[in-house]
Image: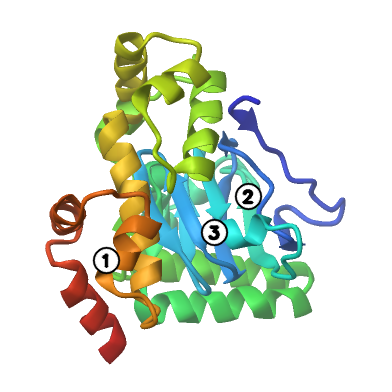
Amino acid sequence: MKLIIERLNKDAKSSFVLQKDVYPHYPTPWHYHPEYELVLVVKSSGDKIIGDNISTFTDGDLAFLGPNLPHVYHNSKIYYEENSNLTAEAIVIHFTSDFLGNVFFYLPEMESINRFLEESVMGFSILGKTGKLVARKMHEMFAMGGAERIIELLTILNILAETKQKTKLASPGFIQNFKASGSEQITEVCDFIMKNFTSDLTLQQVADKAHMSPNTFCTFFKQRTRKTFVNFLNEVRIGYACKLLSHEQYNISEVCYMSGFHNLSNFNRQFKKLYKTSPSAYQKQHAKK
């Protein structure tokens, strides 16, 4: 398994890709592609890694990714259970920088959109009312054809370029230092962590998975993710804890152990480090919403 280059098939009568996917769970491993991508999670939940950014996703999550930005969407464990009847649904738009010609986005009228496309090398999470508006437009595009569909895509890009309801995902340091070399080991390691983070996962186990000594692995992992293995693992666990905290049937202690932590004080400390609030306060805030 390696960091793959994914290419979506484009209809012969279309200049860009617009498709709706329905899976038992998202199948694509850590990957990248030369196209820009707008991905809407229609129905699903789990964790996503975009560059060196780790966060959770659920219904309505919307992200815009620049070319060659490594990413993966990994569903919650329940999606992989043998008798699960859940589905992971998404709408995806792929387009190249020259799908309207080599100079189109360099026209004076396209300055704002072109700047947005250049900044998207780090990826954007699209939030709030803007996210809902763009999601609605993506659904509506399936009923369009011809020039109308292209015009709607340009409208979406203009909305994304002008809105303030977006946040960057990957860090500048990751973009500057990312190397595809060693991608096979990183992909295998990330997949192994995502499947086993709730267990008592050790550095030795993960280093063995990458066929490296612990010291060599630590250096290798940080060079390619800009995170230590421990920080990476804690972020995945805390992200999962956030989903559990949104369900009132779990108390803080239960969430701690279900997320892979074995010490309540450490769980509270790591949670506050990432979210600047305590797990109990986070749960109360979510309940109010």
Residues at badges 3 and 1 in contact (C-beta under 8 Å)? no
Amino acid type for the residue under numbered disc 2 = Phe
7 or 16, nearer to the observer: 7
Which residue in the structure is indicated by mark 3? 76
Q: Residues within 10 Å of mark 2 (few under 14, many from 20)?
A: many
- Left of 230 or right of it: where is 25? right
Which residue in the structure is indicated by mark 1? 253
Cα distance between the residues tagged 3 and 1: 20 Å
Task: Give the percent coordinates (x, y) of residue 265.
Answer: 14, 55
- N-terminal of the pair, mark 2 or mark 3, is 3
Which numbered marker is on residue 95?
2
Cα distance between the residues tagged 2 and 1: 46 Å
Residues at badges 2 and 1 in contact (C-beta under 8 Å)? no
Q: Residues within 10 Å of mark 1 (few under 14, many from 20)?
A: some
Q: Residue at x 40, y 49 (%)?
A: 123
Looking at the image, residue 90 lies above or below residue 188:
below
Q: Secondary structure at mark 1?
A: helix
Task: Give the percent coordinates (x, y) of residue 231.
Answer: 26, 38
Amino acid type for the residue under numbered disc 1 = Ser
Q: Residue at x 31, y 47 (%)?
A: 235
Q: How is the image coloured?
A: rainbow
Label 3 or label 1, whichever lies nearer to me, is 1
190 or 176, nearer to the observer: 190
Task: Give the percent coordinates (x, y) of residue 257.
Answer: 34, 57
Q: Residue at x 44, y 25 (%)?
A: 206
